[in-house]
Image (cartoon, rainbow, N blue to C red):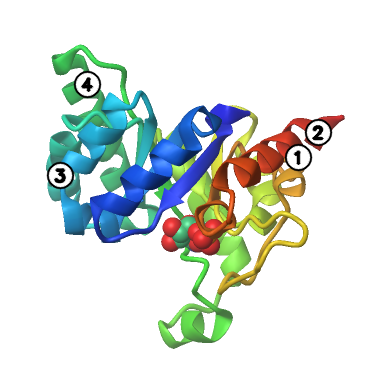
Amino acid sequence: MKDRLIVALDYSSDEPVKQLVTSLDDSVSYYKVGMELYYSVGESIIHYLKEQQKNVFLDLKLYDIPNTVAKGLSALTRLGANMMNVHASGGSLMMQKAVEAVADEAARLSIARPQVIAVTILTSMNQEQWGQMGHTSEISDQVVRLALLAKESGMDGVVASPQEASAIRSVCGDDFLIVTPGVRPVGAAVNDQSRIATPSSALRQGSTHLVVGRPITAAPDGQAAAKAILEEMEGAFK
Ligand code: C5P
């Protein structure tokens, strides 16, 4: 289960990251580096996490023409992250080129190929904003459609809310990553998340990886919080 819990490092400098990683120690093995941290600190933060033997999900959500995304991901592959992502709405050619570029660069460097996953529709999008953009479909239908397109384009999985996980699982099959934020243990502060699930229900709905930030990073005892979440994850299928 440790490989399936990803702690979000939502910071703008490396000091709090190093403090957190040191304090969480062996209880957490996978971290997410997003735009704030990566654009503030740069690639040194990836090197630091790799030196600490941690897995890294580099959450930069690339979206551009296929050639540009492919070249960008190829450059990022050299940093050694384990997982990276793009927007599925970039289309199937963009996703195919993305996976190909990552595979080629990893082979050239003789390193394991990082997994590449797709963001379907941002969970901050609501039906009203969706309609303003000229769409007439239901967001939930579009999420499943884009997840299937991602799978057919060779992506390893998608980022999705826990509520979307079971529909995606039934359409995309077993061998597909579903990485879900919006996870809150019972009793934890909801913060600004809305469509939340507990760690065990997210796993039961088909999530393979849980992204958890503040329930661990803002806890008085982060290690205890991480261990409690891992225990709940272990119990999900008992
Ligand atoms: O602190 P919290 O557990 O809410 O952090 C969740 C993490 O997942 C944050 O880094 C947030 O940006 C990210 N995320 C999210 N919802 C999405 C995509 C990413 O909460 N749809």
Instruction: Kindly report the distance in space between the C-alpha atoms of the residues bearing marks 1 and 4.
Output: 35 Å
Q: At numbered mark 1, what does the secondary structure look like: helix, strand or loop?
A: helix
Residue at 59% over, 59% down: 182
Horizontally, residue 168 falls left or right of residue 232, namely left
Residue 16, percent from left and from top: 34, 53
Q: Which residue is denoted by mark 3 in the rendering?
A: 72
Q: Quadrant of the C terminus?
A: top right
Instruction: Kindly report the distance in space between the C-alpha atoms of the residues bearing marks 4 and 3.
Output: 14 Å
Q: Which mark is residue 235?
A: 2
Q: Which residue is denoted by mark 1 in the rendering?
A: 232
In this view, the residue farthest toward the top is 110
Query: Closer to the camera: disc 3 or disc 1?
Result: 1
Please state which amino acid type lies under the numbered disc 2: Gly
Horizontally, residue 36 falls left or right of residue 124, namely left
Instruction: Kindly report the distance in space between the C-alpha atoms of the residues bearing marks 2 and 4.
Output: 36 Å
Q: Residues within 10 Å of mark 4 (few under 14, many from 20)?
A: some
Residue 82, percent from left and from top: 35, 30
Residue at 19% over, 59% down: 40
Q: Which residue is denoted by mark 4 in the rendering?
A: 106
> Does ligand 1 reach within 8 Å of label 2's beta carbon?
no
Residue at 49% over, 53% down: 146
Q: At numbered mark 3, what does the secondary structure look like: helix, strand or loop?
A: helix
Q: Residues within 10 Å of mark 2 (few under 14, many from 20)?
A: few
Marks 1,2: beta carbons within 8 A: yes
Q: Residues within 10 Å of mark 1 (few under 14, many from 20)?
A: some
User: What is the quadrant of residue 11 in the picture?
Assistant: bottom left
